[in-house]
Amino acid sequence: MKTLLTFALLAALGTGSAFMLRTEPSFNGSAQLTDGAFRDGLYLGRLAAQSGNQRHVAVGRWANLQDRSSFSAGYQQGYSEFLASRVAPTAGAQD
């Protein structure tokens, strides 16, 4: 019984350590909302679409590759979401 308890404890500690030490974050759901580069891209993408500007992702604003890809994903999402909201019919509109 003591051996089983020790094994379970070591397995739990190993799993917890593995999750804490992973190097690449998962950008989905709430993780994206807390990432500054993603939120910056989301804002600038929406702003560009609202202004009628063409899609131009300025990733040079961010120093490392991870932030650049996060910014780019946010920009693309913000730009596309704004355009999709303009094209989608409004719920209260009648012909």
Image: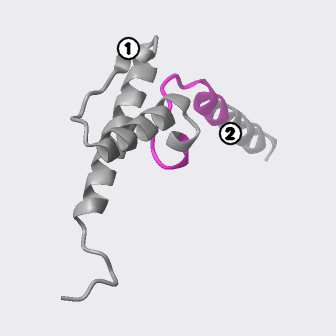
Say which label, 2 or 1, has the lower sequence index.
2
The location of residue 48, given as percent across then percent down, is 33, 38
The location of residue 93, given as percent across then percent down, is 28, 83
Q: Which residue range is magenta in the image?
A: 15-31
> According to the image, what is the colour scheme of the structure?
one colour
Provide the secondary structure element on which disc 1 rests: helix
Amino acid found under the numbered disc labelled 1: Gly
Residue at horizontal 61 percent and vertical 35 percent from the top: 15
Q: How many marks?
A: 2
Q: Is residue 57 left or right of residue 17?
A: left
The location of residue 59, given as percent across then percent down, is 36, 20
Q: Is residue 68 left or right of residue 53?
A: right
Front-lying residue, 29 or 55: 55
Q: Quadrant of the C terminus?
A: bottom left
Q: Specify the farthest residue to the left.
A: 95
Q: Specify the farthest residue to the front.
A: 51
Residue at horizontal 33 percent and vertical 47 percent from the top: 50
Above-or-below relation of 69 to 47: above
**Residue 20 part of the magenta-drawn span:** yes
Provide the secondary structure element on which disc 2 rests: helix
Residue at horizontal 26 percent and vertical 53 percent from the top: 83
**Residue 47 part of the magenta-drawn span:** no
The residue tagged 1 is 60
The location of residue 55, given as percent across then percent down, is 23, 34
Front-lying residue, 66 or 89: 89
The residue tagged 2 is 12
Front-lying residue, 12 or 32: 32
